[in-house]
Image (spheres, grey):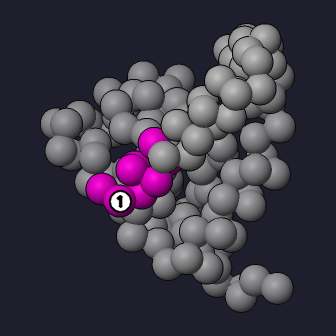
Amino acid sequence: MRPKNMGSEIDIHLGKRLRRRRRLLGLTQQQLAGACGVRFQQIQKYECGANRISAARLWQLSEALQVPVAYFYDGLSEQERNAAEAKIAEDSGEVLSRKETLDLIRAYYQLDERPRRRLLDLAKSLHGDAEGR
Protein backbone atom coordinates (compact mmCIF):
# COMPACT_ATOMS: atom_id res chain seq x y z
CA MET A 1 0.00 0.00 0.00
CA ARG A 2 1.24 3.45 -0.92
CA PRO A 3 1.20 6.44 1.44
CA LYS A 4 -1.25 9.18 0.48
CA ASN A 5 1.39 11.73 -0.43
CA MET A 6 3.73 9.35 -2.30
CA GLY A 7 2.41 10.43 -5.69
CA SER A 8 2.75 14.11 -4.94
CA GLU A 9 6.28 13.68 -3.55
CA ILE A 10 7.34 11.94 -6.74
CA ASP A 11 5.60 14.56 -8.89
CA ILE A 12 7.45 17.31 -7.02
CA HIS A 13 10.76 15.48 -7.37
CA LEU A 14 10.24 14.98 -11.13
CA GLY A 15 9.29 18.64 -11.47
CA LYS A 16 12.44 19.79 -9.70
CA ARG A 17 14.59 17.59 -11.92
CA LEU A 18 12.74 18.94 -14.99
CA ARG A 19 13.32 22.56 -13.94
CA ARG A 20 16.98 21.91 -13.11
CA ARG A 21 17.73 20.37 -16.51
CA ARG A 22 15.73 22.98 -18.44
CA ARG A 23 17.62 25.79 -16.74
CA LEU A 24 20.96 24.03 -17.21
CA LEU A 25 20.30 23.97 -20.96
CA GLY A 26 19.21 27.62 -20.91
CA LEU A 27 15.73 26.85 -22.19
CA THR A 28 12.64 28.86 -21.33
CA GLN A 29 9.43 27.13 -20.36
CA GLN A 30 8.03 28.34 -23.68
CA GLN A 31 10.85 26.73 -25.66
CA LEU A 32 10.51 23.41 -23.85
CA ALA A 33 6.75 23.51 -24.24
CA GLY A 34 7.14 24.06 -27.98
CA ALA A 35 9.45 21.08 -28.25
CA CYS A 36 6.87 18.88 -26.52
CA GLY A 37 3.71 20.26 -28.12
CA VAL A 38 2.18 21.74 -24.96
CA ARG A 39 1.65 25.25 -23.62
CA PHE A 40 4.20 26.78 -21.26
CA GLN A 41 1.61 26.72 -18.47
CA GLN A 42 1.72 22.93 -18.62
CA ILE A 43 5.49 22.99 -18.10
CA GLN A 44 4.92 25.30 -15.11
CA LYS A 45 2.47 22.81 -13.63
CA TYR A 46 4.89 19.92 -14.18
CA GLU A 47 7.74 21.85 -12.57
CA CYS A 48 5.81 22.64 -9.41
CA GLY A 49 4.33 19.14 -9.17
CA ALA A 50 0.75 20.30 -9.65
CA ASN A 51 0.26 18.02 -12.66
CA ARG A 52 1.50 14.46 -12.97
CA ILE A 53 3.77 13.74 -15.94
CA SER A 54 2.57 10.80 -18.03
CA ALA A 55 5.00 8.19 -19.30
CA ALA A 56 4.65 9.43 -22.87
CA ARG A 57 5.23 13.06 -21.87
CA LEU A 58 8.22 12.08 -19.71
CA TRP A 59 9.69 10.39 -22.76
CA GLN A 60 9.18 13.56 -24.84
CA LEU A 61 10.71 15.70 -22.11
CA SER A 62 13.72 13.40 -21.81
CA GLU A 63 14.32 13.65 -25.56
CA ALA A 64 13.89 17.43 -25.59
CA LEU A 65 16.24 17.79 -22.61
CA GLN A 66 18.70 15.20 -23.96
CA VAL A 67 18.69 12.98 -20.89
CA PRO A 68 17.56 9.41 -20.27
CA VAL A 69 14.17 9.01 -18.56
CA ALA A 70 16.04 7.67 -15.52
CA TYR A 71 17.50 11.17 -15.01
CA PHE A 72 14.20 12.34 -13.57
CA TYR A 73 14.26 9.62 -10.91
CA ASP A 74 17.80 10.26 -9.66
CA GLY A 75 17.75 10.92 -5.94
CA LEU A 76 14.51 9.11 -5.13
CA SER A 77 14.52 6.58 -2.32
CA GLU A 78 14.18 2.92 -3.30
CA GLN A 79 10.52 2.84 -2.19
CA GLU A 80 9.68 5.99 -4.12
CA ARG A 81 11.55 4.70 -7.17
CA ASN A 82 9.66 1.38 -7.10
CA ALA A 83 6.31 3.19 -6.83
CA ALA A 84 7.24 5.51 -9.69
CA GLU A 85 8.45 2.66 -11.90
CA ALA A 86 5.23 0.74 -11.25
CA LYS A 87 3.23 3.79 -12.35
CA ILE A 88 5.34 4.21 -15.49
CA ALA A 89 4.92 0.51 -16.32
CA GLU A 90 1.18 0.85 -15.89
CA ASP A 91 1.10 3.91 -18.16
CA SER A 92 3.56 2.62 -20.73
CA GLY A 93 1.49 -0.01 -22.50
CA GLU A 94 1.79 2.28 -25.51
CA VAL A 95 5.58 1.78 -25.56
CA LEU A 96 5.03 -1.85 -26.48
CA SER A 97 2.96 -0.82 -29.49
CA ARG A 98 5.66 1.44 -30.96
CA LYS A 99 7.33 0.33 -34.18
CA GLU A 100 10.81 0.79 -32.70
CA THR A 101 9.98 -1.51 -29.78
CA LEU A 102 8.53 -4.15 -32.05
CA ASP A 103 11.56 -3.96 -34.37
CA LEU A 104 13.87 -4.40 -31.38
CA ILE A 105 11.92 -7.41 -30.09
CA ARG A 106 11.89 -9.04 -33.54
CA ALA A 107 15.64 -8.54 -33.98
CA TYR A 108 16.28 -9.90 -30.49
CA TYR A 109 14.37 -13.10 -31.15
CA GLN A 110 16.10 -13.62 -34.49
CA LEU A 111 19.35 -14.11 -32.56
CA ASP A 112 20.41 -17.51 -31.31
CA GLU A 113 20.09 -18.21 -27.59
CA ARG A 114 23.68 -17.41 -26.61
CA PRO A 115 23.88 -13.99 -28.33
CA ARG A 116 20.42 -13.19 -26.92
CA ARG A 117 21.63 -13.91 -23.39
CA ARG A 118 24.76 -11.82 -23.96
CA LEU A 119 22.69 -8.91 -25.32
CA LEU A 120 20.37 -9.09 -22.32
CA ASP A 121 23.35 -9.11 -19.95
CA LEU A 122 24.77 -6.11 -21.78
CA ALA A 123 21.49 -4.20 -21.50
CA LYS A 124 21.29 -4.98 -17.78
CA SER A 125 24.87 -3.86 -17.21
CA LEU A 126 24.22 -0.59 -19.07
CA HIS A 127 21.17 0.00 -16.89
CA GLY A 128 23.33 -0.57 -13.82
CA ASP A 129 25.95 1.85 -15.15
CA ALA A 130 23.27 4.52 -15.63
CA GLU A 131 22.11 4.09 -12.02
CA GLY A 132 25.66 4.40 -10.71
CA ARG A 133 26.22 7.85 -12.23
Q: Is residue 71 visible?
A: no
Q: Amino acid at mark 1?
A: Gly
- 104 vs 72, nearest the viewer: 104
Q: Is residue 18 visible?
A: yes
Counting the numbered discs, the total is 1
Magenta stretch: includes residue 114: no
Residue range corresponding to the magenta coloring: 126-133
Measured from the top left, where is residue 12 in percent x and y? 48, 68
Which residue is at 68% across, 70% downward? Answer: 83
Q: Quadrant of the N terminus?
A: bottom right
| Image: 17 above or below 36 | below
Q: Main secondary structure of the magenta part?
A: helix
Measured from the top left, where is residue 94 in percent x and y? 80, 31
Q: Callout 1: helix, strand or loop?
A: helix
Which residue is at 21% across, 46% downward? Answer: 23
Task: For label 1, count other residues whose C-alpha is less than 10 Å away and answer few (under 14), some (14-19) or many (20+).
Answer: few
Residue occupied by mark 1: 132
Which residue is at 58% across, 68% downward? Answer: 81
Q: Quadrant of residue 103?
A: top right
Which residue is at 65% across, 69% downward? Answer: 82
